[in-house]
Amino acid sequence: MRLQGKVAIVTGASRGLGEATALAFGKEGAAVVVAARTEQVQDERLPGTIHETAAAIEAAGGRALAVRCNVTDPESVQQMVQATLDAFGRVDILVNNAAVQPPGRLASIQLRHWDLEFRVNVNGPFYCTRAVVEPMTAAGGGVILNISSAAADAMAEGRAGHYGVTKVALEAMTRGFATELREAGIAVLALKPRGVVDTPGARFARGGVVPDGVPGPEDFAEASVILVTARPDTLTGEALFEHEVIERYGRGGTVGAGAARSSPTI
C-alpha cells in the first residue's frame, strides 16, 4: 500500500501503459482518476475504455473515477481536474501518459498529423500540469510523472523521428517544471520504456502481433509506482528507464531519502 491515501490522475488510461499504471496505483491504495477519450470501443483491435479500467480497479478493492478528457483541450483538462477535486478533494499524483504516434518520417509526415502529435504529446502534458499545480501546492506538494520514450534518446544520437522530437520536448519540459515547482513541494519526473512493450497499441501498429520476448507492462507499472513516491528533496527532474528505476530502488521499493538529488539531472 505504497500509495495509501493518495489521489492520482492517469491520462491515456483506457488501455496499454496507462491502464497498467492505473491498475497498479489502485492496488497500492490510491484513488485513481482514469482519464482518456475512449468511452466505447470503436475498433476491436484497440480494446479498452475508461469505464472498464475503472471497473477493474474497483473489482480489485480500489477506488476509481472514469472521466472523459481530451488533453488537447484546456477546458476539458480543467473539467477533469475539477471532477477529481469534487470526488476526492485533492490531487497528489498526475501521470501524463496520453500520446499519439502518427505514421511517416520527418520528411513525409502529414502536416495535420505533425500538429496533432504536438498537441497531444507536448501541449497535453503542459495543460494537465498547469491545471494541477494549484491544488497540489495547496495540499503541500505532489508528483508529476511524464511518460517519455527511448525515441528521445534516439534523437540525441542523431536518429531523427517526429515522435522523438515531441519526447525531447517533453523531457525538457520535465526539467523546467522540476526547477520551477521545487519550492511548491512538487517533484516532476519522466519515465520511459527502453523498448517495445506488449500493449494493444503496439500490437495494432504491428498487424496484431509483437515479437517473441517483448515484455508486458508489469515492470513499467512497478517503476511508475516507485517514482510517484518521490519528493523534490529525494528525486526530481530526471528521465529514467523502467529498468533503471527498479535497479536503483528495488521491486516494492520507494524513493527514500537515501536517494536524494539536489537538482534536476536530465
Image (cartoon, helix red, strand yellow):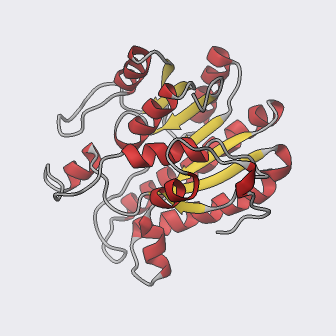
In this picture, is 111 found above or below 217? below
In this picture, is 185 found above or below 38? below
Q: In which quarter of the image is the C terminus?
A: bottom right
Give the percent coordinates (x, y) of residue 151: 42, 68
In this picture, is 52 found above or below 197? above
Q: Which residue is drawn at 18% across and 56% down?
A: 206
Q: Residue at x 77, y 38 (%)?
A: 141
* Figure disc tally: 0
Q: Which residue is drawn at 70% across and 48% down?
A: 256
Give the percent coordinates (x, y) of residue 19: 39, 35
Can see residue 18? yes
In this picture, is 114 found above or below 76? below
Residue 169 left/right relative to 255: left
Give the percent coordinates (x, y) of residue 239: 58, 62
Residue 85 left/right relative to 218: right
Residue 187 left/right relative to 101: right
Q: In which quarter of the image is the N terminus?
A: top right
Give the percent coordinates (x, y) of residue 70: 48, 37
